Image (spheres, rainbow, N blue to C red):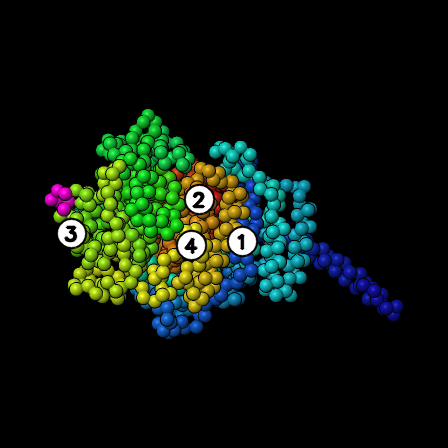
């Protein structure tokens, strides 16, 4: 530091001292800066101790594959006393169970902590347009602009220094990475003056530029095809704006109420237990139950079934979940092996995977199923179509050309499906079929269907509504399904009426149509009377000469004119307070719901023909409705679809190391608009879209676009057999469900329904990712990929054949 010529000697000494001090401080600051650059991202211990095997090839997905709707911003709900305004809104929707959107957010200062507490205390005054399960106004606390780091809402620049891919570092790349990091940090600073839209465009451009090459094993074999390799310094997770859909704190209920609110039957909230630090390896035991390898906890609850006083309405076949979800593991069948791939699996499966012979002995003469050496074979027949399902399917369309399989009629419900050959062969006509049958004396019929790669669930038409919304199925089919439709005022037939789309068809193939013995004549007369009173029009009655069976097709009315002109109000119309979409634990009633009147209401118009309906925004969504992600509903729908198309094409298909030819049965455990399933439409797979009962009720939208799904409470077991699915996808499911029940039983349920060598993909908060990863490790699952950034994480794991001794 220079001084003037007149400075005194002691001034020069001070100058020397100050210069030395300045240099020391400058060096110290420089070292701190370097340290901050190289260690700015902290990975939770639960994830950081995960290491891929050194022999495993790791493929880094394209960075844009993890982005959300690029350039979008979240529209925050106004938090000022919406309780007083909700009742007056024209939509008159109800709101989901209260949940705090500040959960799982890492706060970085005491000021933010105090703000969190304030937000939580004001939760009741910051609501959307919905009510809780008791019909009372509660709400999800909406975050103000300053409550979160900017990257969780509007996005920071993509910064490779935030990467935490679990692979061994390469020393010779450190300098190059440091230079890139400095350059991007300078870009971040320069972007402070940019507008929000300019920053969004910059982020998207950088993600495109930084995308690397993805390399998979060239042989694509099952042994090596699922392994993946990093080929460059790629960013595999989005910056803030790209993670819009990943961050649960940004979601809202939108216009749709929750299934819990509609049904008003959700169990009391369960307290979330603290994470256990015990060694999970020591707690795993095999389930000691009569059902053994076929154990379905909510259908095999022998203690609850023994307490039933009545079983005449199949109460013993309905769901009776244990008070405490089981944490035991279901054993594997002896000799289990990876399933045969679709479409060959439709014709035969490994016998040892579903080692049951009774159905073959009882139904073999009807070409249902046969055992042949190490295979169980399915000739494609059924009770009403012993000469094959394809002939029967074509016969239906010949009887009524307006059905137009795969165009006008896309989504079908098959009641009492047997081994689901009808639904299995409807794939040939581009039709998606939800098949169901009870877990009864027709041993393992639904399990056979799933092992074949055909959609099916275990359910019964008993005393409760089926777990589907109203007016969603284009066609409902019953071929000798053994359901007494004509009894008790046609109560079970009225449940089909609830599910059938206005103008939809009921296809009934049964002996009363073509046999003339007194019993069948009596049933036919009763069916004729009840269908006429329901205003169903019989549009076709024909006989199939080849199979020597008869077929009757009924059409549901499209308006209320017939209802109003009936001489007798029998069956009666339901009360206006009866919500036809409420479907979770709702007792059946012998009544009919009025049909929509407003031309813009759901159900008033038939959807676009398939496949146009997949991508087209449903006509009944409008800009006055708030979508789940905070935008007007039509824009939300489009953005969600675009997001999942990017994620699936750039990450899941080519960057996760999944050998997709081995994947057939897929479940989206927390579906919103069905965008994930829609993005997979060109693959030879099907996706069960599950809408949680405490999530916005968007399941009707999923059906409208030609997909299917069901409601479920993940605090209970799913109504499917063990080893049913090849891949489960959970987007912020676990953090959401953990607010009501423990995470451990849910992961045990995942282990139950995933096949050995099956995959689980989880996108969630980092603390949840860590907990899931630790549990899966204790279950001896292989962790294929674990990654985190900005409190968000991604995990891909594969189940093994390990079972405890």
Sequence-first disc among 2 and 3 = 3
Q: Residues within 10 Å of mark 3 (few under 14, many from 20)?
A: some
Looking at the rendered structure, which numbered label has been put on residue 526? 3
Q: How crowded is the residue under tag 1: few (<14 C-alpha within 10 Å), some, or many (20+)?
A: many
* Residue stretch rendered in magenta on the structure: 516-521
Marks 1/4 in contact by CB < 8 Å: the verdict is no
- What number is the disc on residue 760? 2
Residue at screen point 30% across, 60% down: 558
Mark 2 vs 4, N-terminal side: 4
Of mark 1 and mark 4, the one earlier in the sequence is: 1
Which residue, given by chain and number where applicable, does mark 4 sit on?
Answer: 613
Which of discs 2 and 3 lies nearer the camera? The answer is 3
In this rendered view, identify the residue nearer to me: 709 or 601. 601
Q: Is residue 352 above or below residue 765?
A: above
Q: Are marks 2 and 1 in contact (CB under 8 Å)?
A: no
Query: Which of the numbered marks, if any, corresponds to residue 427?
Result: none
**Does 517 lie within the magenta span?**
yes
Q: Are marks 1 and 3 in contact (CB under 8 Å)?
A: no
- Residue found at x 40% / y 71%: 82
* 208 lies left or right of 488: right
């Amino acid at each position: 530091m220079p001084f003037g010529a007149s400075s005194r000697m002691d001034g020069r000494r001070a100058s020397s001292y100050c210069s030395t001090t300045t240099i020391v401080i400058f060096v110290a600051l420089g070292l701190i800066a370097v340290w901050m650059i190289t260690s700015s991202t902290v990975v939770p211990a639960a994830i950081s101790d995960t290491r891929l095997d050194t022999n495993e090839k790791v493929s880094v997905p394209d960075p844009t594959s993890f982005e959300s709707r690029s350039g979008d911003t979240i529209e925050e709900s106004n938090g000022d006393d919406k309780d007083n305004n909700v009742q007056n809104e024209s939509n008159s929707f109800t709101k989901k169970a209260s949940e705090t959107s500040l959960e799982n957010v890492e706060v970085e200062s005491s000021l933010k902590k105090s703000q969190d507490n304030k937000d939580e205390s004001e939760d009741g005054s910051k609501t959307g347009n919905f009510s809780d399960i008791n019909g009372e106004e509660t709400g999800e606390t909406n975050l103000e602009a300053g409550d979160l780091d900017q990257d969780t809402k509007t996005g920071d620049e993509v910064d490779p220094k935030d990467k935490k891919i679990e692979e061994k570092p390469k020393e010779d790349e450190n300098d190059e990475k440091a230079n890139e990091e400095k350059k991007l940090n300078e870009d971040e600073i320069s972007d402070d003056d940019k507008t929000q839209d300019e920053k969004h465009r910059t982020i998207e451009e950088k993600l495109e530029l930084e995308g690397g090459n993805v390399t998979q094993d060239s042989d694509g074999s099952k042994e090596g095809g699922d392994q993946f390799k990093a080929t460059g310094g790629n960013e595999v997770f989005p910056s803030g704006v790209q993670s819009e859909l990943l961050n649960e704190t940004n979601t809202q209920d939108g216009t749709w109420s929750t299934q819990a609110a509609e049904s008003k039957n959700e169990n009391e909230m369960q307290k979330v237990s603290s994470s256990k630090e015990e060694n999970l390896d020591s707690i795993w035991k095999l389930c000691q139950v009569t059902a053994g390898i076929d154990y379905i906890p909510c259908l095999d609850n022998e203690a609850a079934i023994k307490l039933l006083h009545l079983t005449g309405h199949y109460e013993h076949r309905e769901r009776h979940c244990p008070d405490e979800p089981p944490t035991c593991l279901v054993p594997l069948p002896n000799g289990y092996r990876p399933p045969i791939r679709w479409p060959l699996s439709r014709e035969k499966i490994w016998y040892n995977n579903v080692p049951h012979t009774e159905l073959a002995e009882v139904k073999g003469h009807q070409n249902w199923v046969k055992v042949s050496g190490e295979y169980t074979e399915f000739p494609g027949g059924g009770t009403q179509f012993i000469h094959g399902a394809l002939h029967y399917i074509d016969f239906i369309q010949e009887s009524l050309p307006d059905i137009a399989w795969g165009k006008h009629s896309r989504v079908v419900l098959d009641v009492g499906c047997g081994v689901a050959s009808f639904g299995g062969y409807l794939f040939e006509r581009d039709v998606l079929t939800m098949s169901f049958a009870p877990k009864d004396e027709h041993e393992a019929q639904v399990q056979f269907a799933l092992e074949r790669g055909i959609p099916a669930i275990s359910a019964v038409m008993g005393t409760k509504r089926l777990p589907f919304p109203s007016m969603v199925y284009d066609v409902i089919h019953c071929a000798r399904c053994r359901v007494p439709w004509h009894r008790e005022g046609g109560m079970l037939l009225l449940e089909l009426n609830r599910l059938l789309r206005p103008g939809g068809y009921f296809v009934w193939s049964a002996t009363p149509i073509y046999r003339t013995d007194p019993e069948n004549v009596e049933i036919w007369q009763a069916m004729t009377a009840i269908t006429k009173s329901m205003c169903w029009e019989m549009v076709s009655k024909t006989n199939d000469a080849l199979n020597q069976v008869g077929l009757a097709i009924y059409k549901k009315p499209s308006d209320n004119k017939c209802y109003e002109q009936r001489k007798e109000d029998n069956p009666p119309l339901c009360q206006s307070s009866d919500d036809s979409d409420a479907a979770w634990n709702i007792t059946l009633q012998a009544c009919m719901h009025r049909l929509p009147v407003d031309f813009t209401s759901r159900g008033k118009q038939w959807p676009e023909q398939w496949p146009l309906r997949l991508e087209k925004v449903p006509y009944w969504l409008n800009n006055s409705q708030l979508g789940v992600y905070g935008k007007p509903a039509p824009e939300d729908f489009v953005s969600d679809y675009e997001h999942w198309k990017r994620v699936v094409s750039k990450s899941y298909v080519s960057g996760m190391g999944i050998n997709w030819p081995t994947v057939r049965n897929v479940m989206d455990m927390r579906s919103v608009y069905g965008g994930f399933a829609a993005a997979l439409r060109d693959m030879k797979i099907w996706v069960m879209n599950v809408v949680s009962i405490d999530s916005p009720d968007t399941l009707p939208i999923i059906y409208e676009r030609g997909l299917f799904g069901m409601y479920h409470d993940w605090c209970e077991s799913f109504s499917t057999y063990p080893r049913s699915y090849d891949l489960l996808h959970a987007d912020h499911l676990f953090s959401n469900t953990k607010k009501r029940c423990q995470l451990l039983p849910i992961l045990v349920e995942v282990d139950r329904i995933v096949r050995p060598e099956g995959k689980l993909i989880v996108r969630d908060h980092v603390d949840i990712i860590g907990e899931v990863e630790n549990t899966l490790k204790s279950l001896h699952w292989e962790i294929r990929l674990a990654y985190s950034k900005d409190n968000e994480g991604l995990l891909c794991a594969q189940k093994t054949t390990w079972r405890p001794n």
